[in-house]
Structures are given as structure tokens and as C-alpha cells.
Image (cartoon, rainbow, N blue to C red):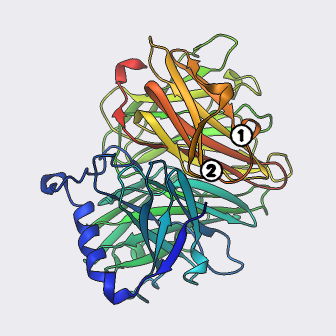
Amino acid sequence: MSGRVMRWPLVVIALATVIGLAVADRSDDDADGGLVQPSRDAISAAPGPDAQGGVWYCSEGTSLPGEFADHTVTVANPTGVAVAAEISVFPATPIGSVSPRANPERVLLDVPARSQYSLRLAEIVESQYTAALVEVDSGSVVVEQRVQGPTGMDVVPCASRSSEVWYFAAGSTRRDARLVFTLFNPFPERAVVKFTFSTDEGLREPHALRGVLIPARSLVVVNATDLVPRFSSVSTTVETQVGRIIAGKLQLFDGSEGLEGLTAGPGVPETQTQWVFPTGPADPGVAEHIVLYNPTDREAAADVRLRLDPTEVGYALPPFEIRVPAQQRVALVFGSRGSYPLPSAPFAYGAGESLAEGVGFWAAVQVYNGVPIVAERVVAAPAASSPAGVAATVGTPVHARSHLVAWNGAGDADVALVVVNASPDSIAQVTVSRVAEGRITPIAQLDPREVAPHSRLVVPVDRLTEGGSFALLVEASQPVVVSRSLLARTGTGMASGLSIPLDLILLDPSAF
């Protein structure tokens, strides 16, 4: 069963949209009327069944023929009733403009019970870059965005909150790269932001990016490659001087230096003292590194722990002790293949000799001196290999008993779901179900499956489910961390992103 799309007149719903958005994203101090506010510890999280609705921000993609990141939004409804989703599609406004280029176009989706609906934004607005504001009348509905182009693909949750500051640990402006930041302001007040880049040569604050205006209800895009050229590795802070925004990143590698790929997604709105990454490589030829970015004025001291897949359940290597200088970033590198640009010494630590090729693992980052940081994981395989591409994802400081992954319709890709039980002493009973066509159907081979303490379960989704497009619901007897990865079977394409928690809980630092 498919959803129904209707265009709505701008004048009829504009006022209601602005009022609803302001209410849904206001601070906790103003909460009333049954709305559950977005978590301050997660980039993307459903407000929960007690909420009257939810608001999602999808700001990283393109919507012109021939562009590199064709933008699609997917709304997944796991509930037993149909829900309405109003989607406002914003074209990009040229940098330096004092008013939006155009009003957003709006459509209303009718998303049936226990199903999902995808909307390609180019069908609504033609613009080099586009953003979508998605307002739903259920707190259990989740929204993801998918980008795809000649150099690869990515699938990531849309953000469920705004912020006055956004952090990006990984990035590159070298010759074969394009690094683009999206600045989305769907609110009725203007915003002004400044950029700070951390490089091997110290901080960079380009004059042109010390006061970027984002008009009310607009999307502004900054091509950092033009302004911070030829740095192999950069970390970025986007900080508002006025207002609040949703900031995202598009990173492209064109293949001219041996690496081809596309990554996308919102930044990190809060530094943390712990991060978990469920997915570690088990595919030969795929290299990985974790970037730790410290935007504070104090040195951070962190342990990075890897727990390997069986043979020995929960087996952990000795922790890697990493010190991250103030206003700098450090990469912990597991193998040098993939041609991904890395920081130079002393900002890169080699750990490849600790892992055998093809061994999977999950990772936990824990700061032990109290200085919060940002952590991002990057995997890469050179363009000549199979698989080939780049995937990047931030870690998570939360886990949950229920998770939803909105889109799993890649018929030409291997799709894997990874479930991590971070508890040191309790077994998690996990059920994975397919959500599609009005039904929630447990995957028979996984009904349920035990996940031992400090271990993970890898589910080859494409081998265990029927074809078509569907969502996945993960339910566990105790909180777990869940991610989804995609590998194209031919050509270039990798994606690795977290699920969206439906009942999130902060991870317990003592568990690691």
C-alpha cells in the first residue's frame, strides 16, 4: 500500500506550520500540551508514543538533474493507524542573500499503518541543494534521508532537533574532494553563524565565514573546498552568533586520487564523554579510522576499546589510550588502505597491526578526564576494489529497547543490521521485524536471538527478507545500540548509519 501525496496551498497552512514548528522545537522549559521534547543527547530520536507529533529536519542533498546527491526523504510509520506527514521542501538561497530565494513548496503525505513512504525532493522543487522540514502527527514515526549520485550513496536519519552549535569530526578539502556544509533555518527568525576549522596547521577562520547570514525559513550552502583549500583532514565547528539552525555535511570524493564515494548527514550538536560505534569492518580491503575531535580549550584523554566478533565472545583488545589536544583532532587508524585522507603525524595513530583482516568488531570511546569530545567513524575502500566507496557515521551516546530503521530497499546492495549489547553482564533477547504493507512480521530466523554481554549480532537483512522497500523494527529485552550498513554489489556505494531510537537511554559509562 502506498501513501497519498497532496499539494497544499501555501497561504492556508503557512501560519499553522510556523506555529507548530516553534512549539515542537522549543526548549524543555516551555513544554506543555503533551508534547515530548527531543532529547538533548541524540541527533535523531523519535519523541515517543505520548507525544502529539514530531518534527524532523533533512537538509543534506541536491535536487537538480546531473547533481551528485539526489535527495529522497522516507517517512516510516510503525503504528497501527495512518499518519499525516506535512513536508516543506526548501530550495537553497544564495550565500549573502538577506531573504529566502523562494517560499518552500509543501505536500501532505498520507502514510498508512505499518508502512513507509519515500518522496524524491526533485519531484517537488528543482534546486541545486534542497532541505525538507517534515512534521508528523505521531511521536512514533521516524524520518530518514537518502542521497545518491555517480560517486556513491548514503542513507542517514534526519535530525530531530536544532542547536546553536554543530560539530563535524571528519572532513577533507584535498584536490579530489568536495566538502559542503548545509545551514538550514526553518524558523521565523534569522540566524548568523561562524565557522572554525581545525587542521594540521592549526585553526582556520576564513574571513568570509565569520558571519554567514541564514535568513528566516531558508537553506544556505557553504562550499568549504573553495575557502579552506587543500587540507587532507579538517574538523569543523559551526557556531551560531544569532539564532539556531540545523547544520549538515556532504562529502564527495571524485575518484581522481583513487577514492570515490559520497557521505552525508547532520553534524553533532553536543560533545560527549562516551561514544559507541556498532559496526566495524569484516570485509577484506575495507579500511577504517575513528576521528576524535576536541573543540574545547582543554586536552582530552580517552580510551578506545575494540570488542572483536567471535571466536571468543566479547573479547576485547587492550584499550588504545589517545590524547586529543585542545582545538585539535586525532585519528585512530585501522589499516592504511582506502586512500582516505588522514591527519599527518602527530595527529594519527596506527592500530592496524592489532587486527586481523576480515575480523569484525564494535568500538567504544570513553573520555576519562571529563573533557567532552566528538567522535566519527569512517570506512573506505579504493575505487578499484569491490566493495568500493566511503561511509561515515558519528557515534552514539545512547541506547534503547526499541529502534526503527526507515529504509531498506536497496535491491542491488548487501544490507546488514548490527545490534550491540553494551551491558557487561546481561543477555539481550532481540527480535527483528519487517515493517511493510500494513504488517509487522518478525524475521523467523531471528525470533528471538540472544546477544551476549559486550557482544553484537550481525543480521544479513537482504538474505533473510523478501525484496521491496520496507522498514525494520528492532525490539530488545534491554537497551541495545543498532546500526545499518549497505554495500553495493557492483560499482561504488557504501553507507553506514545508526538506527533511530524510540525510547532512548543514556549509556552507562561503567559498562565499558
Q: Which mark is residue 470?
A: 2
Horizontally, is 256 left or right of 128 in the view? right
**What amino acid type is highlighted by mark number 1?**
Thr
Residue at label 1? 465
Q: Position of residue 425 (x, y in %)?
A: 44, 11
Nearest to N terminus: mark 1 or mark 2: 1
x 64%, y 81%: residue: 64
**How would you rate the neighbour count of disc 1 (Cα within 10 Å): few for under 14, some for 14-19, many for 20 or more?**
some
Seen from the viewer's position, the closer of residues 42 and 302 is 42
Task: State how far apart marks 1 and 2 are (Cα).
Answer: 10 Å
Q: Position of residue 454 (x, y in %)?
A: 52, 18
Q: Kindly tell me whether residue 89 is visible in this rendering.
A: yes
Task: Say if 233 sits above or below 57 in the image.
Answer: above
**Image quadrant containing the C terminus:** top left
**What amino acid type is highlighted by mark number 2?**
Phe
Task: Say if 273 sits above or below 407 in the image.
Answer: above
Q: Position of residue 467 (x, y in %)?
A: 74, 49
CB within 8 Å, label 1 to label 2 = yes
Seen from the viewer's position, the closer of residues 263 and 24 is 24
Horizontally, is 277 left or right of 400 in the view? right
Seen from the viewer's position, the closer of residues 262 and 139 is 139
